[in-house]
Image: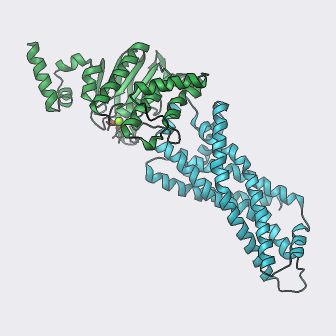
Amino acid sequence: MITVENLHKSFGESHILKGVSTTFESGKTNLIIGQSGSGKTVFLKSLLGLFTPEQGTIYYNNQPYSQMTADERIELRQKMGMVFQGSALFDSMTVEENVMFPLKMFTNQSRSEMQDRVDFVLKRVNLVDAHNKLPAEISGGMQKRVAIARAIANKPKYLFCDEPNSGLDPKTAIVIDNLIHEITNEYNITTVINTHDMNSVMEIGEKIVFLSKGLKEWEGSNKEIFKTDNEAVTDFVYSSELFKKVRQMYIEERD
Amino acid sequence: MKYLHAIGSYFLMIGNVFYKPTKWSITKNLILKEVEDLIYGSLGIVIFISFFIGGVVAIQTALNIDNPLIPKYLVGFATRQSVILEFGPTFTSIIMAGKMGSYITSSIGTMRVTEQIDALEVMGINPLNYLVLPKIVALMLYPFMVATSMFLGILGGWAASVYGGYTNSADFIQGVQSNLIPFHITYAFIKTIVFAFILATIPSYHGYYMKGGALEVGKASTTSFVWTSIVIILLNYFITQLLLG
Ligand SMILES: Nc1ncnc2c1ncn2[C@@H]1O[C@H](COP(=O)(O)OP(=O)(O)OP(=O)(O)O)[C@@H](O)[C@H]1O
Ligand SMILES: [Mg+2]
């Protein structure tokens, strides 16, 4: 479980996060939504300790991150998996080496055990014929999937994904959503996902936090987001005609 | 103030390089890769430049001694002295500040810009140890490169003098062998080891702490070259004053 309390983060004059508090439970897929530039990435990187917040506390299982020793942080981080918005694959390594990297680093598995695990996770992200390609030789969507495979290879306890299915076709996006949802439930992972994808919101949003202007504007589940009267949320979620219609049908059905 | 801050964070970085070492089985492969990229990949240019500069040094010396009282072997002697004392260690290092330095800065800088360094950090790896230590270790082979440069510089001097008709082979070789002070060699290799450390760390510093995007990677490489050269030149001065002065 991760608890965030009154998180503030600025860059020079611009105040990006202005006091965000929320909780992410384990075994649940937690989604952060919000407009482009609303600070989702900054929020996620602050959770990971890549940015140091000016104010506020982040608790990992009730232990404040800022008070952990360097060794405790390293230990915690070895249990994390992160998918960066830009994938951040190691460009001097092949796809397979990228995915194997955390296994080589932190386990004592034999070569064949690691190979099996790599094949398994690559298969789960629908990538079966790119093992020996370099990141520069595959498409953006494929890179994203390699990044997901790398993040889950070593069975993390915390999984952070910054727009895991941007750049994917709708069908693959669903595969990825389902994969993240499944492993989250199966291994009781604390998962936090930044997304723009309304389909993900509807399908796997067990908890949704809506960030706007540096503040948490709304939070709730995918069931609640249908019913909310919060205008900022409905404006954002139902900005597409299709979703407006879906909502209309939902409301009519309910009445 | 800005410089003081940079110097401070440079030394902090050096400290962190040795903290939380990565698994040896992984580090070993990284070192081998750096030896290939940094040392092996630069040998060609070092050989080429050393041979021809050695030749030029010999020709210049020969042209400047038209006094018949000065013995002919002086050409060989002067070539050896300048090649061993300055050309081999210092000049080669300045060239390597351009070649290896820009490679190191741009490769680490690209990793910074594309969040690969963040990815390492999030995995609980010490990125400085992972990225910089193998370069420092690989550059411990740098003295061999400088020795190659010295040998080829003298060879180039010999070839230019003999085939250019400035001295004969025997005179040149006599010059190369005369009045050799062993401490000069020690001095040259002490410098070389210091420069090797500078060549590995200052470009790493500029790559690691850069901010911005692809454009800034280019700028960081240039800045890195300027500072690596300045530090090498300054240290060269101080070491010379300290050891020979
Ligand atoms: N390292 C940084 N230095 C300065 N400003 C930054 C930095 N990172 C982000 N910002 C600023 O913080 C704001 C929020 O950026 P962030 O990347 O978190 O947005 P986002 O919600 O993830 O957007 P998107 O959906 O487009 O990814 C932006 O205005 C950005 O300019
Ligand atoms: Mg973002």
Viewed as shown, does residue B207 lie left or right of B25? left
| Count of numbered circles on the image | 0
**Chain B tint as drawn:** cyan
The image quarter containing residue A74 is: top right
Q: Residue at x 88, y 72 (%)?
A: B175
A7 to the left or right of B86 = left
Residue B153: quarter of image: bottom right
Q: Nearer the viewer, residue A203 or A146?
A: A146
Image location of residue A180, percent across then percent down: 37, 22
Task: Examine the rendering and report whether any part of residue B201 can be seen.
Answer: yes
Q: Position of residue A164 (x, y in %)?
A: 36, 30
Q: Give the vertical position of B159 relative to B135 (above or below).
A: below
- Side of A86 where A37 appears, left or right: left
- Quarter occupied by the C terminus of chain B: bottom right
- Chain the render paints green: A
Residue appearing at x 88%, y 79% in the figure:
B72
- State the residue in front, A52 or A151: A151
Q: Is residue B199 above or below residue B81?
A: above
Q: Is residue B11 visible?
A: no
Spot occupied by residue A222 in the image (x, y as percentages of width and height): 25, 19
Query: From what the image shows, is residue B124 above or below residue B169?
Result: above
Q: Which of the two residues, A81 or A99, is positioned nearer the viewer here?
A: A99
Residue at 58% in and 57% down: B225
Name of the residue lying farthest toward the front: A129
Q: Quadrant of ligand 2?
A: top left
Colour scheme employed for the rendering of this structure = by chain
